[in-house]
Amino acid sequence: MPKSISISKIDGKPGKVYYPLSLDEVEKQSPKNGEVVVKIHAAALNHRDLFIRQHLYPGTAFGVPLLADGCGTVVEVGSGVDSSWKGKRVVINPGEGWQDSLEGPEDKSGYKILGGTKTIPNGTLQELMVVKQSELEEAPAHLTDVEAAAIPLTGLTAWRAVMVKCGSQNIGPGKNVLITGVGGGVALASLAFAKAAGANVYVTSGSEEKIKKAKELGAKGGVNYKEEGWDKKLLGMLTTEKKQFDAIVDGAGGDIVGKGSRLLKNGGVLAVYGMTTGPSMPFLMQAVLKNIEVKGSTMGSRKEFTDMIDFIKSTKAKPVVSNVAHGLDLDAINGLFEEMKKGSQFGKLVVEVSSSKSKL
């Protein structure tokens, strides 16, 4: 019987409990009309998976396969699906409820993400996954299974923040872009997309080692945000004639509007995809006077997922993978979760479930 990994229920309050992983045997499902069966080769962690284990995420469910990111090969097709899909290596759209609107999800119940919740009782941390064919894209040929699995959710979040919210007028050759908090999956994907689009990318981090690694990936420079006056130091690094940033992509919040008011050009864009320092941040008059646009950004639509995958294929962009666990090994996967808890990773944490080179 196919295997999957979910969480088991134990007593404990939200934020205090840490649900254990469970290796489950599940019935093999047959695809219905419009569905396919995907043999999963690799699945990747996101911070929401840690929150699910800590009961800090809405709709937490037991017995539902974890994880939203996955790469695999189609091994069976249902009625209504072109037989040419069989044998294709694919990546899976990580959510549902948002087709192509620029404003946000069309579904009144909002955007629903795969893995570990009641909203979509399905996830990628399993050997065989039944999924709608319409939610698949062919995996970029230049990426390994592990690299392809590292893309979906963080890549989609980064794509919307960088390419949609900041826009082509601020992302491209000669443009200066700042990515804050480099090291996490979204920040690194943002770096990859902005660089592939031709922008001059700069980063911040609280770790000199992470800044060094970001520069090895193509960042023009970076500063430690723990240093006093880091924003002035950053402006001094700019090599273009215009000593200002066109856009900032931020996942921390805090005082970023104040810093951004000094760093950004008139009419510059600050795209915020998270607030790890707290649930609110001040909007200052100095930002108003500079006509700075602060744009919230989260996840992305099905169309944007296609656009992102096409861009990755054409530019040969690659995600950064920090560590890999092999097989559905609970100890090894728990080790990845511990890395996420500590925040020691640089890039994505991935589980290699099976090899695409193995017999289907």
Image: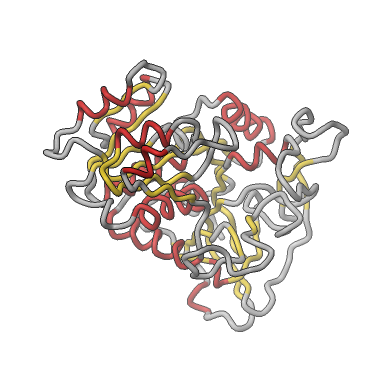
Which residue ends up furthest to the bottom in the rendered image? 80
* Above-or-below relation of 148 to 8: below
Which quadrant holds the N terminus?
bottom right
State the image quarter where residue 244 is shown: top left
Q: Is residue 183 left or right of residue 197?
A: right
The C terminus appears in which quarter of the rendering? bottom right
Residue 15 in the image, given as x and y percentages of width and height = 75, 31
Residue 357 in view, yes or no: no
Please provide percent x and percent y for residue 246: 27, 45
Q: Residue at x 71, y 71 (%)?
A: 30
Q: Is residue 71 above or below residue 328?
A: below
The relative height of residue 294 versus residue 338 in the rendered view (above or below) is below
Residue visible at 36% across and 55% down in the picture? 163
Q: Which residue is pictured at 28% across the width and 55% down the height? A: 315
Residue placed most toward the observer, 260 or 156: 260
**Outermost residue, right direction?**
11
Q: Quadrant of residue 213?
A: top left
**Colour scheme:** secondary structure
Q: Nearer the viewer, residue 43 or 230?
A: 230
Camera sees residue 5: yes
Q: Give the tally of numbered discs.
A: 0
Which residue is most to the left?
A: 241
**Could you tell me residue 261's position as x and y percent?**
34, 36
The residue closer to the viewer here, 120 or 88, is 120
Percent across and percent down for residue 303 are 46, 67
Q: Is residue 205 left or right of residue 7?
A: left
Please give the name of the residue rendered at 47% of the width and 40% of the height, measured from the top-left corner.
283
